[in-house]
Image (cartoon, rainbow, N blue to C red):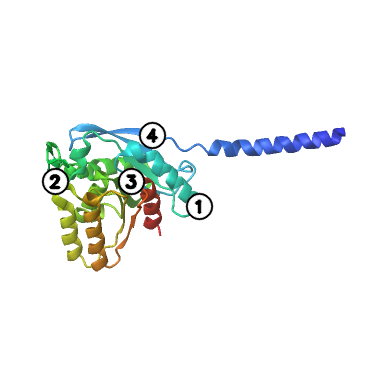
């Protein structure tokens, strides 16, 4: 090869390498930041993980904020889902706040109840029924701390799976203005003889108008999960409040755990549809 051609080839190769290097730097997902918030309401420290969008430091505008139950279990899943959808301009980038658990059953169940096992025995849940205290913590202590520390817009989404999804439905029907949108993946509406389902049926019957968005889903999970899910679908089909945007999905090839993956993707799409 002639010297001039070798030099030209070297320049082209160097240019390609330099253009590839910055791109490689951008593919690492943002690392969630650990934040410890002391709760006077719960009388304990609560750890939350906050994941900001890729361009958070470069941008000036506020971002919608998503509060996530079972934070450590799902923050990377929903974070990568958000990244994928945001890169395709399907949804805006979000600040994600993943709340860690200390007593999961206490915080995510709206009423006290002891679970009945399939064999007829009872599994005692002595601390169950603390959801409203947990919501007081989120609303009065956690949200102000997040809004003080991070650049967030006044558009909030609550996301939960299983008991966390039961909590999502409970918030929607008892404190609807706490969030603008709700995603409930495989909600455990069987809890306490379907008490939250019955309250939801009364709530929707009493509201002619509700400017909220709601997505809920279910895997292939049996009658205990399916019956109250179908009942909630029927309630919303028979009487949908004005301006209430809702959608549900059943994934027959998913189980209780894996329904979250598809539910979170479809739910985020519906929230910003």
User: Residue most toward the right?
Assistant: 2
Mark 3: secondary structure: loop
Q: Is residue 51 visible?
A: no
Q: Work out how far the residue at label 4 is from the one at label 2, CA to CA, in angstroms.
A: 32 Å
Q: Identify which residue is drawn at 19% across, 54% down.
A: 174
The residue to which callout 2 is attached is 111
Tell me the number on the disc at residue 255. Answer: 3
The residue to which callout 1 is attached is 88
Residue 118 image position (x, y, % from top left): 17, 42
Q: Nearer the viewer, mark 4 or mark 1?
A: 1
Residue 10 image position (x, y, % from top left): 76, 34
Q: Identify which residue is drawn at 80% across, 37% down.
A: 8
Residue 254 image position (x, y, % from top left): 36, 48
Q: Residues within 10 Å of mark 3 (few under 14, many from 20)?
A: some
Q: Residues within 10 Å of mark 1 (few under 14, many from 20)?
A: few
Mark 1: secondary structure: loop
- Judging depth in this view, the residue of 136 and 60 nearest the camera is 136
The residue to which callout 4 is attached is 33
Q: Residues within 10 Å of mark 4 (few under 14, many from 20)?
A: few
Q: Work out how far the residue at label 2 is from the one at label 3, CA to CA, in angstroms.
A: 26 Å
Mark 2: secondary structure: loop
Closer to the chain start, of discs 1 and 2, is 1
Is 156 placed left or right of 9 in the picture? left
């Amino acid at each position: 090869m002639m010297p001039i051609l070798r030099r030209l080839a070297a320049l082209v190769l160097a240019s390609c390498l330099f253009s590839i290097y910055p791109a490689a730097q951008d593919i690492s997902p943002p690392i969630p930041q650990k934040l410890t918030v002391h709760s006077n309401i719960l009388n304990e420290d609560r750890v939350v993980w906050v994941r900001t969008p890729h361009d958070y430091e470069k941008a000036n505008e506020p971002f919608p904020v998503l509060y996530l139950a079972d934070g450590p279990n799902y923050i990377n899943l929903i974070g990568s889902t958000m990244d994928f959808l945001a890169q395709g301009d399907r949804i805006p980038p979000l600040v994600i706040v993943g709340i860690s658990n200390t007593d999961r059953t206490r915080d995510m169940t709206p009423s006290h109840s002891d679970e009945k096992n399939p064999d007829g025995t009872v599994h005692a849940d002595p601390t169950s029924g603390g959801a409203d205290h947990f919501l007081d913590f989120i609303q009065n202590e956690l949200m102000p701390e997040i809004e003080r520390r991070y650049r967030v817009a006044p558009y909030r989404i609550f996301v939960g799976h299983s008991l966390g999804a039961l909590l999502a439905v409970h918030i929607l029907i008892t404190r609807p203005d706490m969030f603008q949108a709700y995603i409930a993946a495989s909600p455990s509406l069987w809890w306490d003889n379907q008490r939250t389902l019955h309250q939801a049926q009364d709530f929707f019957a009493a509201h002619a108008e509700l400017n909220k968005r709601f997505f809920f889903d279910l895997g292939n999970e049996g009658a205990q999960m399916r019956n109250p899910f179908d009942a909630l679908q029927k309630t919303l089909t028979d009487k949908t409040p004005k301006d209430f945007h809702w959608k549900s999905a059943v994934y027959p090839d998913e189980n209780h755990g894996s329904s979250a993956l598809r539910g979170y993707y479809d739910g985020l799409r519906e929230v910003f549809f």
